[in-house]
Structure formats: structure tokens, C-alpha cells
């Protein structure tokens, strides 16, 4: 994929998004109950939360689609309530409700977007060509988008968002339904947007692994409040969950060793035991020596480090019904 497109970085380093005291209710249902958020420019931020937590509502407010009840919200340096047009000019939104027209070719879709943004005929064609090349769609440029694979369609959708050279892109579930290879391609595209173009990404995703590999910072939304914020590593340190799982080769060794392991959970039928700890080399060596000392043969040892799934399950609650 080539890099013929390079957006000028904004001169100021004001946060891409700053939110203080954001509140939103639907009738008596308080969806967002005092959200504070700062997202630096040129970073990837991921908002996570269970279904119904208010992620879409947050994105809709930040992208000026709906109004907040209260709060000070600045996006790309502009107040969303006072200057919604300037916010709209600085952002791109892509995701579940794709702007791609299946009856048009990839090239026509891009040119249509360029026309809507009044880029002018020559500049519009040039931009379409650049983006087709960048997103590896040149060979498919003259085919109707209806014939594209899921991955190609997502790339075209993102390319259409980039016609307007946004500073900030809201990416809503960018890889849902994609196969592992297409998902990785998309991740690289997102990283390139940040690293090469200085774009800020606001990501919503159902895949915690996606937030883990992509996001600089993650926030967890639960019942209208941000219950945790930080880098994926910081969040993982907030929850216990690291353990070593041992599966024994036979019941005699299992019975001999179990009382000495400090296991927090065990299963007599499966001959397994869970020992808390991060699974460092020293801990593992000690454990293996202990098992040897009790002549316990082991079938399998696995180390489980906490992941964002553990954090998500520990810190978020089901929304009230
Ligand atoms: N227009 C609306 N009118 C009334 N209630 C709404 C409206 N839009 C959203 N809600 C409610 O607000 C809450 C938050 O919805 P939202 O779509 O923001 O959640 P979400 O975190 O994006 O969920 P999901 O992961 O399922 O997409 C839900 O309880 C939803 O039913």
C-alpha cells in the first residue's frame, strides 16, 4: 500500500477531544452521568462497555448528531454546541452505517464523496486515485462495490471518510465480521493513519483484543459512568486474574501435591489446580520443584495473564433492565 497522502499536522496540540461533566438522559433514563475525558491528538482511544452502556450515545454527541443535556465538550478545538459545523468539518465517522453505495464502483463512490465536499473535478479525481492506491483498491476501482469482499468494503468506507482529510475519525466496530487476515490489514491501516498522518482515532469495538492491540488509552463505560481509564497495561494491572493452571497426569500425584500448592481453585475430577501469580520464571521454577518434590507427574502447565476481558468482566456491570 503506498503513502501518497499526507495531511498537515495541526499546529496546536490542544486535545483532540476534551469532555467535562457530560450528561445525557432519555426521559427518566440517565444514559451518561458525568463523563470526563481527554484524548490527545494523534492517539488511538477506545471506549468499551457492555451493550447499552452508552457508547453510541457518546459518539453521537461528540460527532454532533445529538445534543448533550449538560457538559463542556470540545472536539478538534471547537465547542460542539456553539460550533457544530466546524466540528463536522474536522471529523470523519465510519462504521456500522457505511456510506458505501453498492451500485457505484469504488472510484465512483470516492468521486461522489469528493463532489459532496466540493473538492473540484481535478482534485476530486486525484484524491480518489490516491486513496484507491493507498487502500489497495486500484485493481477493483471500476467494479461495483456490491462485488467487494467485507474487508474491501471496510477499506473503501474508510477511504471515503478520508476524502475530507479529517483530523479525528470515529471508527465504529471497524473489523466486525472480518476474517483474521483482513482484520490485521485494517489494524495496520489504522496505525498508519495515526503514525503517518497524525489522525486521532476514537474506536468503539466489541473485540477487547482489538482495543488491546490498537489503543493507547482505553476507557470503560458502565451504567453511565467511566469506571476506569488508562493504557491497556494499566487497566490489566487493576484486576487480579493472573494464575498458573496445572493439569496432573494421575490422581496420586494430584492428591500428594495439592495441599502444598496454595491453589485458589481445583477440580478433583479433571485433576487441575489454579495457583495465583503472574507466572514469572521464578514462580514457575518454584512450582515445578514443588511438584517434583512430591513426585507429581504433570500433563500440562499453562500461564494465564489477565487480559482486557478480565478487566471488562471485573469492572463493568450489566445495564439495569
Ligand atoms: N433515542 C433513544 N431513545 C431512548 N433511549 C435511547 C435512545 N438511544 C439510546 N437509548 C438508550 O440509551 C442506552 C445507551 O444506548 P447506546 O446505544 O448508547 O449504548 P451502547 O453502549 O452503544 O450499546 P451497544 O453496545 O449495544 O451498541 C440504552 O439503554 C438505550 O436503550
Image (spheres, rainbow, N blue to C red):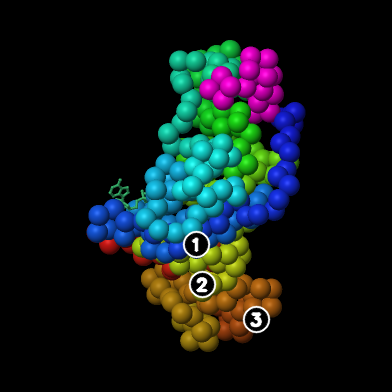
Residue beneath label 1, please?
20
Whether pointer 1 and pointer 2 mark residues with C-beta atoms closer than 8 Å, the reply is no
SS type, badge 1: strand
Disc 1: residue Cβ within 8 A of ligand 1's nearest atom: no
Front residue of this view, candidates 11 and 99: 11
Label 1 with label 3: CB-CB less than 8 Å = no
Q: Which mark is residue 286?
A: 3
Position of residue 290 in the picture relative to residue 148 (left or right): right
Q: Please give the name of the residue rendered at 44% of the width and 37% of the height, measured from the top-left corner.
A: 96
Residue 190 position within the rendered picture, expressed as x and y whole percent measured from the top left: 63, 41
What label does residue 239 carry, if any?
2
Tell me how far mark 3 sits from mark 2, CA to CA: 24 Å
Give the residue displayed 27% in from the left and 58% down from the top.
Answer: 29
The quadrant of the picture occupied by the C terminus is bottom left
- Front-most of 156 and 7? 7
Is the residue indicated by label 3 positioned so its CB lies within 8 Å of ligand 1? no
Amino acid at each position: 500500500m503506498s503513502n501518497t497522502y499526507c495531511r498537515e499536522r495541526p499546529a496546536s496540540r490542544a486535545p483532540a477531544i476534551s469532555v467535562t461533566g457530560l450528561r445525557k438522559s432519555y426521559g427518566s433514563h440517565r444514559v451518561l452521568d458525568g463523563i470526563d475525558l481527554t484524548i490527545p491528538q494523534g492517539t488511538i482511544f477506545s471506549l468499551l462497555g457492555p451493550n447499552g452502556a452508552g457508547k453510541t450515545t457518546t459518539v453521537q454527541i461528540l460527532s454532533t448528531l445529538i445534543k448533550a443535556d449538560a457538559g463542556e465538550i470540545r472536539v478538534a478545538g471547537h465547542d460542539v454546541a456553539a460550533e457544530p459545523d466546524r466540528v463536522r468539518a474536522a471529523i470523519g465517522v465510519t462504521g456500522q452505517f457505511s456510506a458505501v453505495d453498492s451500485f457505484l464502483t469504488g472510484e465512483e463512490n470516492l468521486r461522489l464523496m469528493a463532489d459532496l465536499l466540493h473538492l473540484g473535478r481535478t482534485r476530486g479525481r486525484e484524491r480518489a486515485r490516491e486513496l484507491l492506491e493507498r487502500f489497495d483498491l486500484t485493481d477493483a476501482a471500476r467494479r461495483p462495490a456490491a462485488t467487494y469482499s467485507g474487508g474491501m468494503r471496510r477499506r473503501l468506507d474508510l477511504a471515503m471518510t478520508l476524502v475530507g482529510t479529517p483530523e479525528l475519525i470515529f471508527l465504529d466496530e471497524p473489523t466486525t465480521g472480518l476474517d483474521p487476515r483482513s482484520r490485521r490489514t485494517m489494524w495496520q491501516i489504522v496505525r498508519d493513519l495515526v503514525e503517518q498522518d497524525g489522525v486521532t482515532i476514537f474506536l468503539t469495538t466489541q473485540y477487547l483484543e482489538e482495543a488491546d492491540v490498537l489503543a493507547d488509552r482505553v476507557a470503560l463505560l458502565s451504567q453511565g459512568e467511566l469506571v476506569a481509564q488508562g493504557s491497556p497495561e494499566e487497566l490489566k494491572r487493576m484486576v487480579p486474574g493472573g494464575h498458573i493452571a496445572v493439569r496432573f497426569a494421575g490422581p496420586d500425584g494430584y492428591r500428594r501435591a495439592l495441599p502444598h500448592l496454595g491453589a485458589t481453585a481445583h477440580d478433583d475430577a479433571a485433576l487441575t489446580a489454579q495457583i495465583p501469580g503472574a507466572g514469572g520464571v521464578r514462580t514457575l521454577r518454584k512450582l515445578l520443584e514443588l511438584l517434583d518434590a512430591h513426585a507429581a507427574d504433570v500433563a500440562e502447565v499453562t500461564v494465564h495473564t489477565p487480559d482486557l476481558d478480565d478487566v471488562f468482566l471485573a469492572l463493568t456491570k450489566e445495564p439495569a433492565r
